[in-house]
Image (spheres, coloured by chain):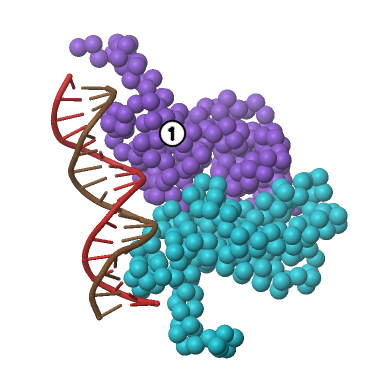
Chain colours: A purple, B cyan, C brown, D red
Amino acid sequence: MNTATKPSLKERQFALRESAILDAVDALLSSKGFDLTTMDEVAQAVGISKASLYKHFDSKELLAAATMTRLLDRTLDKVAELAQQETPLENLKAVVAWSVREHLAGRMPTLPSTRSSIHEFMLRHQPYVSKLEQLTEILGAWIITAQEAGQINPQLPGEVVLYTIYARPCDPVIDFLKMGGAFTDDEIVAAIVTTCFNGLQPN
Amino acid sequence: MNTATKPSLKERQFALRESAILDAVDALLSSKGFDLTTMDEVAQAVGISKASLYKHFDSKELLAAATMTRLLDRTLDKVAELAQQETPLENLKAVVAWSVREHLAGRMPTLPSTRSSIHEFMLRHQPYVSKLEQLTEILGAWIITAQEAGQINPQLPGEVVLYTIYARPCDPVIDFLKMGGAFTDDEIVAAIVTTCFNGLQPN
DNA sequence: GTCTATAATCGGATAGAC
DNA sequence: GTCTATCCGATTATAGAC
């Protein structure tokens, strides 16, 4: 029955197209967000018909969920790569710097802002939620260690620190600074990382 | 010809209804944002028909623009009230605290995030732009003074400081902390103000 | 599984009576 | 100026041929 053999050509082509779709959605969600992105645009960006797109993803919500879940995969990869190379504080800074850079590169689909209609859907999407919990566990441990070492203000509740870090890639300041045109991407990354972690320092 | 007399009853009723419309839009934009708010909802919230709504505002964009412009009026009022009572740094903190509180109270229509379809429209809406410039001038002066006094890091470009302050009321952290339910509004305000201004302090 | 064509719905805006 | 009823374009989603 051949159930465990390597993928056929057709399967590989299918997976490749799926990846191309998600790349396109990355860019569209990053620049326009969920509500303003249409399935027609996605299909056109990939160069397939809308009907074919729906063969891959049953709804716009599921398509966005797959994209957001893949972002968490990338983030978990990045976090694993960083782990224990430096101090927890340096790791946290590196994650924020990386995520701001991803945003600037147009690969950061909007994190679930409370105001997007996709928000509630994501909270019920198991693959996303479970990976988010994984990530939270790792970052949470780094935060606690950094607080014990006095590198992050121990008086700040862990949730405040965590959310402050999670919110950085969707900080409007990034777009404002980018739009102004007076700063390079490196300068923007530095500004966000500096103001963020200075704000979390002990007094 | 009677052009400079006091407003008639009808005119006052009209102005009153207009104000009620803007109040409703404040709440809707604050909770759902521009794209997810429908004119039907606005009309229903006010208790009038959609056609009547369009007698007051010619388009959804103009309605949002009026709401956002009124927000700037409120902000300018607040700023005038604060002016010179305290140091520039304390004034800036008070403005951020006030705006976070407005957000939590549901009176903070989303500032133009780059991803909203209303964003470009606002940049071409003269009343809004000119009031935003007024506000920027005042806050900019406070920032420079605070930097000269060494209360805000003088190495940070003024634009970074200004945008960081402007972005606070739409910081996703506010919604995250509110949603978690573990913090009072006062604690949320304090967390935002502290992490924001610690981040702007000299090293 | 991919396409073209189309159904179904939603939301911004307006016509026309009062 | 306010209402009811309606138009019309845009958008999600699907039918059906190949």
**Which residue is found at the position 62% from the left and 69% from the top?**
B73
The answer for which chain carries disc 1 is A
Nearer the observer, B143 or C11: C11
Seen at 65% across and 26% down, the residue is A85
Give the residue drawn at x 64%, y 67%: B75
Tell me if residue B145 comes above or below residue A62 in the rendering.
below
Along the horizontal axis of the image, is B102 left or right of B20? right
Q: Which of A87 and A122 is in front in this view?
A: A122
- Count of marks overlaid on the render: 1
**Can the viewer see residue B199 in this picture?**
yes
* Residue extending farthest front: B1
The residue where tag 1 is placed is A25
- Left or right? Give the position of B23 relative to A8: right
**In which quadrant of the rendered view does residue D5 lie?**
bottom left
Quadrant position of residue B79: bottom right
Q: What residue type is labelled 1?
A: Val
Q: In this view, does B198 lie to the left or right of B107?
A: right
Residue A124 rendering spot, x and y as whole percentages = 36, 45
Nearest the eye: B189 or B75: B75
Picture quadrant where residue B32 is located:
bottom left
The picture places residue B66, in percent across and down from the top left corner, at: 53, 65
Q: Position of residue A173 (x, y in %)?
A: 63, 47
Q: For the point 53% across and 86% down, which residue is it?
A: B7
The residue carrying pointer 1 sits among few (fewer than 14), some (14 to 19) or many (20 or more) residues within 10 Å by Cα, namely: many
* Figure check: B19 above or below A23: below
